[in-house]
Image (cartoon, rainbow, N blue to C red):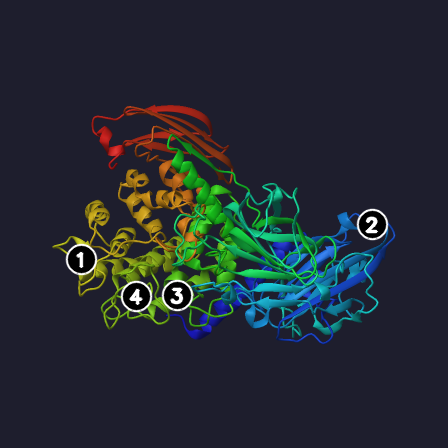
């Protein structure tokens, strides 16, 4: 086992390597001087702003340019968050989430919005303190803006900026709206219009009463000598988040007022009389993540409450069919706006909301209130869909669409398990999300960001945190193995050796932690922290059955799989001798599991050597870890599908079930395993849920994996070698007669089209330049070359036609 000194040296190496890597990525945008020296700008705050309590600060800075510049590049960050305006136009939001040792800053070219003469920079900066989302780390309230060169130095943040401490905004606890279950995504907001500095970001605003900003400390990049900054700044490598106008679909219900169906389109203002109560329920028709913006006039002393929900609930708190509203009510996170009586007042929360339904409840005082408009601005990571899927089963296209919407709403400046309740980047969820991103869009930037962030969370003892960034540390040991799996997936589908290689020391550190927990039996001892494997009624809090000393076949097999994936990375990118050691240990663990846990009578792996519990999970992993002899694997998976006494895999773990079906030649059963996803659509879900039944979250990333498998398994497009340098295509059509699909490859687009008549498959395949591979059907294998090709494959005498469609 490596000594502590060696481990710490490895950690130091990875820190430096990541810094250099981040600098290289940003080198075309950031003046190199700013990556190696202190900045001229200072971190600033509002005079009187609390360091560690809730605050909202406004900043303004006027400056002049003699003529519109060709470029005017600045770098900006804040704690917790900021919005930046130029001459009244919002040009940036941020910073992307990280930790204090890797605090992101965004780079923005202001030139397109500058004009000759006087210009205005304005920013709102807020800190939610203890009420901040769990994913938001923080030191204290602060703001920094640095010009890229001397030409932009006039806007550097310092005492020349003016500041105002907000008195209009306060926070609303999620529990006030009846949010139930674990919630970690942040509060609602209440804005008192009479105290709000309307038009504060415009050039004509009178800021003569504002005070000079208070300076905090020098700003500087990560890894400079004797840093004096509490925030170690690194460039944000992600693009700006998408923001697109998104209109609500319909008025679903009203009370106390008549509302035109044209109101959601912004064409039919609604006036609520004095001393009245009115309610309007609006349906987006699908779940979304958006910045809602309410525009009103009048209504002094009125109260407007805006409640957001994924679904309505009945008197028992049950959701039922998401399209049905009769007898149901809304409950959930809400914002409140108290108008000041002015005209065309716009209210927008500082952070986006997740919702399908929005309800606006109005209580007026002596003055009428006019609801002029309520609109949303959809926001998410700016993925561009490059893949496509179509077949003669129209429901599969609906599954594809709902799956992509699920994945999209769970991807912002980090991946997220769910957009409504947590907004946390869990490694187990993220591995699945990353594969969907690569297959549907070909964009690997958020994947790399996730790998990087999870590496930042690694502790000296070896584990990465289960979710990161997270203000509350949490450790799920198997999720550290999934982090290794994420790197393996990136290597297999994209290559990226220069990105992955610096993480190999971290990977070895994870495996060393596991190795220290191996028992003399060859299985893992009982693991500390939370050994979560799957949400299922038979696993206590997601933990698999264990004996007093551990001895879990499931956890041991996950370790063996992690070792195999690490060995692949070592052999290709690192230490070949270490690869041999990892493979040998993986084989020993797999053999030990089989010897200790194989039940010859049931012909299944048990969850422990005591053989008192049996699960799909243990046998799925037994196949994937090569613990079960190859000759027996198919029969085991047949039994996994048929034996109703086994602990069943959740939506999440069915991703690994499908990997095992594919490995054992049962991939033609894949489509018949999508009943749960069809049922979710029948229940009116427009995204895929966390769990069956009365689920907490209606949009949970780990349930979106059909979007990967419709391409990789049903259309059968898979990488045959690391970096997708060759392709293997083996469709598993089940009962489908027609299918067409495409997916992005690093060299271009792969396109396939299949027509099946009887036992004959007609296939049209287009590969991008430089890519070759093979097409397999019913045991026949045909070579593929770059460009277009048409192939017809018939069953051979040795391969019965039924073998391509084993299940119905």
Circles 2, 3 touching at the beta carbon (< 8 Å): no
Residue at image mark 1: 598
Q: Mark 2 points at which residue?
A: 115
Q: Give me the C-alpha separation between circle 1 and circle 3.
A: 26 Å
Q: Which of marks 1 and 2 is in front?
A: 2
**Separation of marks 3 and 4 at Cα, in angstroms:** 14 Å
Q: Which of marks 4 and 1 is nearer the N terminus?
A: 4
Q: Do the residues labelled 1 and 2 touch (CB within 8 Å)?
A: no
Counting residues from the start of the chain, the first of labels 2 and 3 encountered is: 2
Does residue 215 appear in this view?
Answer: yes
Q: Residues within 10 Å of mark 2 (few under 14, many from 20)?
A: some
Which residue occupies the foreground of this view, 520 or 51? Answer: 51
Identify the residue shown where x is 42% and y is 36%.
397
Which one is closest to the eye, mark 4 or mark 1?
4
Marks 2 and 3 sit apart, C-alpha to C-alpha, by 53 Å
Give the number of the mark in front: 2 or 3: 2
Question: Considering the image in quadrants, where does the N terminus appear?
Answer: bottom left
Label 4 belongs to which residue?
540
Rendered location of residue 491, percent (x, y): 45, 49
Query: Which one is closest to the eye, mark 1 or mark 3?
Result: 3
**Mark sitting earlier along the chain (1/2):** 2
Q: Give the secondary structure at mark 2.
A: loop
Instruction: Give residue 476's mark.
Output: 3
| Residue 488, placed above or below residue 184 | above
């Amino acid at each position: 086992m490596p000594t502590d000194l060696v481990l710490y040296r490895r950690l130091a190496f990875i820190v430096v390597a990541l810094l250099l890597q981040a600098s290289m990525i940003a080198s075309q945008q950031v003046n190199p001087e700013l990556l190696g020296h202190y900045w001229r700008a200072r971190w600033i705050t509002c005079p009187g702003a609390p360091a560690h309590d809730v605050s909202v600060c406004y900043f303004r800075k006027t400056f002049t340019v003699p003529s519109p510049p060709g470029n005017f590049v600045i770098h900006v960050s804040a704690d917790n968050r900021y919005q930046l305006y130029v001459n009244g136009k919002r040009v940036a939001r941020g910073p992307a989430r990280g930790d204090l040792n890797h605090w992101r800053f965004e780079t923005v070219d202001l030139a397109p919005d500058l004009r000759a003469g006087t210009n205005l920079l304005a920013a709102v900066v807020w800190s939610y303190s203890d009420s901040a989302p769990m994913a938001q780390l923080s030191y204290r309230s602060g703001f920094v803006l640095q010009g890229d060169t001397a030409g932009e130095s006039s806007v550097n943040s310092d005492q020349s900026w003016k500041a105002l401490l907000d008195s209009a905004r306060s926070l609303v606890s999620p529990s006030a709206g009846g949010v139930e279950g674990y919630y970690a995504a942040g509060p609602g907001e209440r804005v008192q219009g009479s105290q709000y500095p309307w038009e504060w970001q415009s050039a004509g605003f009178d800021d003569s009463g504002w005070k000079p900003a208070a300076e905090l400390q020098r700003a500087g990049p990560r890894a400079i000598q004797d840093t004096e900054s509490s925030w170690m700044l690194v460039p944000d490598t992600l693009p700006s988040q998408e923001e697109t106008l998104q209109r609500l679909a319909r008025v679903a219900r009203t009370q106390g007022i008549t509302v035109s169906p044209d109101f959601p389109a912004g064409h039919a203002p609604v006036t609520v009389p004095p001393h009245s109560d009115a309610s309007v329920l609006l349906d987006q028709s699908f779940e979304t993540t958006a910045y809602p913006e309410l525009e009103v006039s009048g209504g002094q002393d009125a109260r407007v409450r805006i409640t957001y929900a994924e679904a309505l609930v009945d008197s028992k708190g049950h959701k039922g069919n998401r399209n049905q509203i009769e007898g149901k009510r809304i409950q959930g996170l809400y914002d409140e706006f108290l108008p000041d009586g002015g005209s065309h007042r716009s209210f927008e929360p500082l952070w986006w909301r997740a919702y399908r339904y929005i309800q606006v409840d109005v209580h007026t005082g002596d003055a009428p209130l006019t609801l002029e408009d309520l609109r949303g601005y959809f926001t998410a990571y700016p993925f561009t869909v490059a893949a496509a899927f179509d077949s003669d089963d129209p429901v599969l296209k609906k599954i594809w669409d709902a799956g992509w919407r699920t994945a999209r709403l769970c991807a912002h400046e980090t991946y997220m398990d769910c957009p409504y309740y947590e907004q946390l980047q869990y490694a187990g969820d993220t591995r699945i999300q990353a594969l969907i991103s690569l297959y549907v869009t070909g964009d690997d930037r958020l994947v790399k960001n996730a790998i990087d962030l999870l590496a930042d969370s690694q502790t000296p003892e070896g584990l990465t945190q289960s979710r990161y960034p997270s203000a509350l540390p949490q450790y799920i040991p198997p999720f550290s193995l999934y982090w290794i799996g994420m790197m393996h997936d990136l290597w297999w589908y994209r290559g990226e050796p220069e990105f992955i290689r610096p993480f190999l020391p971290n990977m070895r550190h994870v495996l060393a932690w596991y190795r220290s927990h191996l028992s003399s039996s060859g299985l893992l001892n009982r693991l500390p922290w939370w050994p979560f494997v799957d949400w299922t009624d038979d696993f206590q809090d997601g933990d698999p059955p264990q004996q007093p000393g551990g001895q879990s076949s499931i956890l041991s097999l996950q370790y063996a799989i992690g070792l195999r994936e690490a060995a692949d990375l070592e052999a290709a990118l690192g230490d070949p001798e270490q690869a041999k050691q990892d493979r040998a240990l993986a084989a020993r663990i797999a053999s030990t599991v089989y010897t200790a846990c194989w039940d010859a009578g049931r012909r299944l792996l048990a969850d422990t050597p005591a053989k008192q519990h049996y699960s799909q999970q243990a046998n799925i992993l037994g196949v994937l870890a090569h613990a079960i002899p190859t000759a027996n694997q198919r029969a085991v998976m047949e039994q996994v599908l048929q034996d109703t006494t086994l602990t069943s895999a959740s939506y999440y773990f069915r991703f690994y079930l499908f990997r095992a079906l594919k490995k054992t030649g049962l991939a033609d059963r894949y489509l018949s395993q999508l009943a749960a996803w069809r049922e979710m659509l029948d229940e009116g879900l427009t995204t895929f849920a966390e769990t069956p039944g009365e689920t907490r979250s209606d949009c949970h990333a780990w349930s979106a994996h059909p979007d990967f498998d419709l391409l990789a398994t049903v259309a059968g497009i898979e990488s045959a070698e690391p970096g997708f340098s060759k392709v293997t295509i083996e469709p598993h059509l089940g009962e489908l007669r027609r299918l067409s699909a495409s997916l992005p490859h690093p060299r271009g687009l792969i396109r396939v089209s299949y027509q099946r008549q009887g036992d004959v498959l007609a296939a049209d395949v287009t590969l991008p330049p430089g890519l070759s591979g093979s097409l397999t059907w019913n045991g026949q294998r045909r070579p593929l070359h770059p460009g277009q090709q048409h192939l017809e494959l018939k069953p051979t005498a040795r391969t019965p036609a039924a073998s391509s469609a084993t299940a119905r």
